Image (cartoon, rainbow, N blue to C red):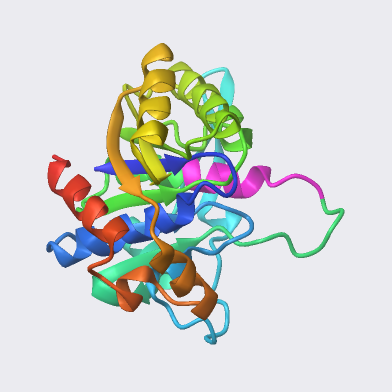
Amino acid sequence: MKIAIAGKGGVGKTTISGTICRVLAQSGERVLAIDGDPNPNLSVVLGIDKNKPPHRSLSTDIIERVEDGKSWTFRVKMPFEEILSTFGQEAPDNVTLLIVGKPEQAGTGCMCGPHTVVRELIHSALTSENEATMVVDTEASLEHMKRGTSRYVDRMYMVVEPYYRSLEAAGRFAEMARQLGIKEVYAIANKVRNEEEADAIKEYCAKINLPIAVFVPYDENITAADLKGISIMDFDKNSKAVQAIQQFVKSLN
């Protein structure tokens, strides 16, 4: 299974992504986490020591441009397992992390290359013998939708908070996901404090035909864990938010 997690900045997308990875891995799955955000933060949420030096980022050298009839396309030229051994970083619970990397410096142009790498890496996984569940933490903008970075995932989940701008953004993400041909598109309602907030999310998602996969309650332990720079799974694996995600993961098939 290949899953992409999307949403507006600040909605808790990376926390949700990393926690899903850890919960999946603890259930016995082999998990490949891809940090597709050029401002990467997934490693901390996965429980990798924040004091460790940055790991090697994915390189555009793993793809090549090839002619496909009258047009040009890209493909991954390295075996999948070689990519994992070269660029993969081990995280707790048998999770492997791949990072697209951040810009070297300001004013150096677009991030087209990293987006292409992630898209083609997901594509190549479709025909590889790798049996890992893939979870892609996308960047907090519509850029990755425009570039089709998540085109080949099986499911996309929009993380939403109970306020209008977040819900409006989720609608835009969902519309573009369907344009990419992603058939299974859902919402993850995050940081929900009460029934009023839950009802507001239900009402808006019903209006845009976006099914809600899970409601994750507001959890102060997530903020406390983030202040310490550690994973919520290592801070309090029995927290309200983790319990909700555990139930969500059980529903995946």
Can you give x and y, in whole percent of width and height, for residue 65 in the image?
58, 39
Can you give x and y, in whole percent of width and height, for residue 53 in the image?
57, 84
Can you give x and y, in whole percent of width and height, for residue 14 in the image?
47, 55
Residue appearing at x 21%, y 46% in the figure: 248
Q: Image quarter for residue 239?
A: bottom left
Residue appearing at x 54%, y 87% in the figure: 51
Depicted 124 relative to depicted 44: above or below: above
Quadrant position of the N terminus in the picture: top left
Asked if one can make out residue 185 in the rendered structure from this viewpoint, the answer is yes
- Asked if residue 213 lies in the magenta stretch, the reply is no
Left or right: 160, with 114 as reference point: left
Depicted 179 relative to depicted 12: above or below: above
Number of numbered callouts drawn: 0
Asked if one can make out residue 152 in the rendered structure from this viewpoint, the answer is no
Residue appearing at x 20%, y 49% in the figure: 249
Can you give x and y, in whole percent of width and height, for residue 228 in the image?
50, 80
Quadrant position of the C terminus in the picture: top left
State the residue lying farthest toward the right.
107
Depicted 57 relative to depicted 228: above or below: above
Per the rendered image, the range of residues in magenta is 109-119
Depicted 129 relative to depicted 89: above or below: above
The kind of secondary structure the magenta stretch mainly shows is helix
Q: Image quarter for residue 251?
A: top left
